[in-house]
Amino acid sequence: MDWNDIQNFLSNIVFGILLCSTLLYWINLSIFSDFHFLSKLGQFTILSSSIILFFILCSRWIIAGYFPLSNLYESLLFLAWLLLTIYLYIEFKTKNKLIGSVLIPLILFITGFANLTLSPEMQKSSPLVPALQSNWLTMHVSMMLLSYATLIIGSLLCILFLVISKNKEINLEPLNNNSTSLPRLMLDYYEVELLISTIKMSEIGKLKLLQNLDNWSYRIIGFGFPCLTIGIISGGIWANEAWGSYWSWDPKETWALITWLVYATYLHARIIKAYQGKKTAILGSLGFFVIWVCYLGVNFLGKGLHSYGWVS
């Protein structure tokens, strides 16, 4: 068994752990909400998955001699690790499982796609093509993936906002003057009817929860947007060094610009206070799907400067 086989075996273990973690989170929320052992076990599985992914990425870095972001397989593992790490911080601060019950299945899908869909050849480390032999590789791709991770989480909060508010008209104005700290992000979440239909929450409790989702989706997206901007700018500089052009309207570049415009519109609406609540949540939710088109969808066209290292 060579080192590539060991890494693939470990990534399959991560997939299995995340599958168990998903079941634990759902059971803990829907049936045994007061069973703290399940809560701790869920945290342990997430931490274990993050550590194993970190080990895989570091080992590929050491063996291959370059930062492991040269193909789709490595970027998927890196994105999964970022999502797990960010979520661990959120769970540590909020002491809740609501976001995890939605985010962990998504990470499970990412690792499953990497392990079960991509060919063995794409999962192996290989020498970098000349265009990728640049320090801009680490800067550009890592910032783009960091922006994807944060924007995905922020957009998931927007989607949760829409699901919880359903078809009702929500007015957050009475609560706008109440600042809410991160540990209170999921205030009264045990009363949310999203996963626990037998528990009824008060209207004020729902409003507080929705305000927290609205505020923190704005804050998280506000962090991810500068990362996306830096990633696009660094990519332009790298492209100019490699191909003599800052922008070539490559499909990936075009969708990166569309992603940037969607979140710029979201932030602009929030900053000037023109919209809040459902209207901005719809924009944030739209960004979730745009990101996946930008990240995965355009790569399978097999066209443009970003086609190498992604499809065979």
Image: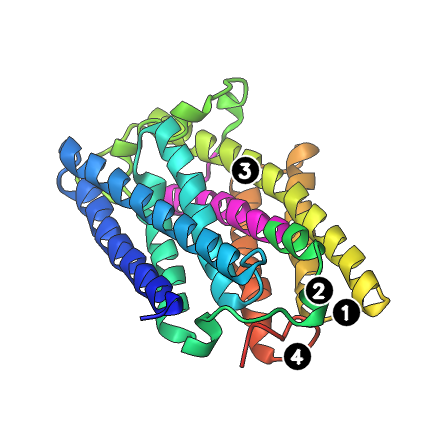
Identify the mark nearer the N-term, 3 or 4. 3
The residue beneath circle 1 is: 249
Asked whether the beta carbons under mark 1 and mark 2 sit within 8 Å of each other, the answer is yes
Question: Within 10 Å of the Cα at label 4, are there few (<14), some (14-19), or many (20+) other Cα atoms?
Answer: some
Residue 256 location in percent, x, y?
Answer: 67, 59
Mark 4, secondary structure of its residue? loop
Q: Amino acid at mark 4?
A: Lys
Identify the mark nearer the N-term, 3 or 1. 3
The residue beneath circle 4 is: 303
Distance CA(mark 2)–CA(mark 3): 23 Å
Asked whether the beta carbons under mark 2 and mark 3 sit within 8 Å of each other, the answer is no
The residue beneath circle 3 is: 220
Q: Amino acid at mark 3?
A: Ile
Residue 1 location in percent, x, y?
Answer: 31, 71
Along the line of sight, the residue nearer the viewer: 119 or 26: 119
From what the image shows, is residue 21 above or below residue 130?
above
- Classify residue 117 as left or right of residue 250: left
Along the line of sight, the residue nearer the viewer: 76 or 163: 76
From what the image shows, is residue 56 above or below residue 97?
below
- Classify residue 279 as left or right of residue 255: left
